[in-house]
Amino acid sequence: MLRERKYLPMGTWMMDTILVLPAVIVALSFHEYAHAKVAYLAGDPTPERMGRVTIDPRAHIDPLGLISLIFIRFGWGRPVIINPSNFKNRRRDSILVGLAGVTANLVLAIVFGLLIAILARINPGFYSNAFGSLVGTMLIQVVILNIGLMLFNLLPIPPLDGFGVAADLFHLHGTMIYEAVYRNSLPILMVAIILGLPGKLLSGPMITIVNFIMTDIARLPGWWVLL
């Protein structure tokens, strides 16, 4: 259902990239804002002092993560620096902060899925004209990118959220495994991306979740015509 982009003509690829940029910015900004906000609410003032408790994209965009999201639809924002010693309950709050970003992406995907459905119901022919088609493409990309970002960040590879949550859940901090993986986090992540592992592992679940949101929650069968 998702179009293969690797063999698209250059002009079409550039248009697709332009249309996907708003989705990238929204997904990354809200993901990192959620981390910062939950950490602040848990008692850590560090994100606020660093100007991260905001949805302003300039505070959250990581160039490499942005490029990764544009080209392979999986990426990350600039990590939010936190000081867990300020948390009211260190282990619990660390897990909540770690899950905040992916939760925000899931909520955003559902909200935009419902928005797409509402527009279709208010004006059944809205997506049939040129302007409506562009709007529909941008909106559905917000759904897809948020689910892609959610799944990618759940991978147990540092510095992704999944690794931090797993470390807190299974008390891995300070162990040899934790130190070895964290020390080599960037090479591990880059090798995974170069080998296309995120796409191979997550494309299926991503399509399944997006389809569930659009078909079962938003009740908009045939949503993929917006792509």
Image (spheres, rainbow, N blue to C red):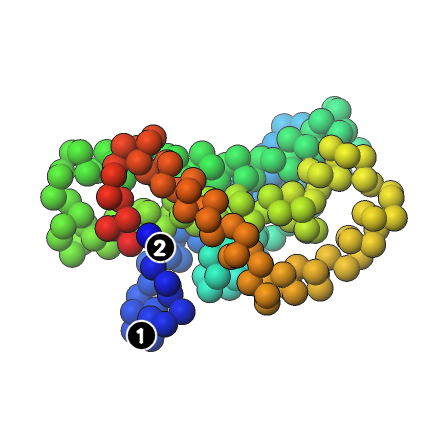
Residue 94 percent location from the top left of the image = 71, 33
Q: Residue at x 46, y 49 (%)?
A: 204
Amino acid type, callout 2: Leu
- For the residues marked 1 and 2, what is the alpha-carbon distance in whole angstroms? 16 Å
Res 123 quadrant in image:
top left
Dot label at residue 110: none
Going by the image, does 139 lie left or right of 81?
A: left
Viewer-proximal residue, 167 or 86?
Answer: 167
Going by the image, does 45 lie left or right of 120?
A: right
Q: Secondary structure at mark 1?
A: loop
For marks 1 and 2, the one nearer the N-term is 2
Disc 1: which residue:
9
Residue 22 percent location from the top left of the image = 38, 53
Give the residue at the far top of this rendering.
Answer: 88
Amino acid type, callout 1: Pro
Give the residue at the far bottom of this rendering.
Answer: 10
Disc 2: which residue:
2
Vertical position of residue 221 compared to residue 135: above or below: above
Residue 66 percent location from the top left of the image = 51, 59
Going by the image, does 82 lie left or right of 61?
A: right
Vertical position of residue 56 compared to residue 91: above or below: below
Residue 47 percent location from the top left of the image = 65, 41
Q: Residue at x 87, y 43 (%)?
A: 174
Vertical position of residue 82 compared to residue 86: above or below: below
Viewer-proximal residue, 213 or 69?
Answer: 213
Vertical position of residue 137 compared to residue 84: above or below: below
Q: Secondary structure at mark 2?
A: loop
Going by the image, does 181 lie left or right of 176?
A: left
Res 40 quadrant in image:
top right
Q: Residue at x 60, y 53 (%)?
A: 78
Residue 208 visible in rendering: yes
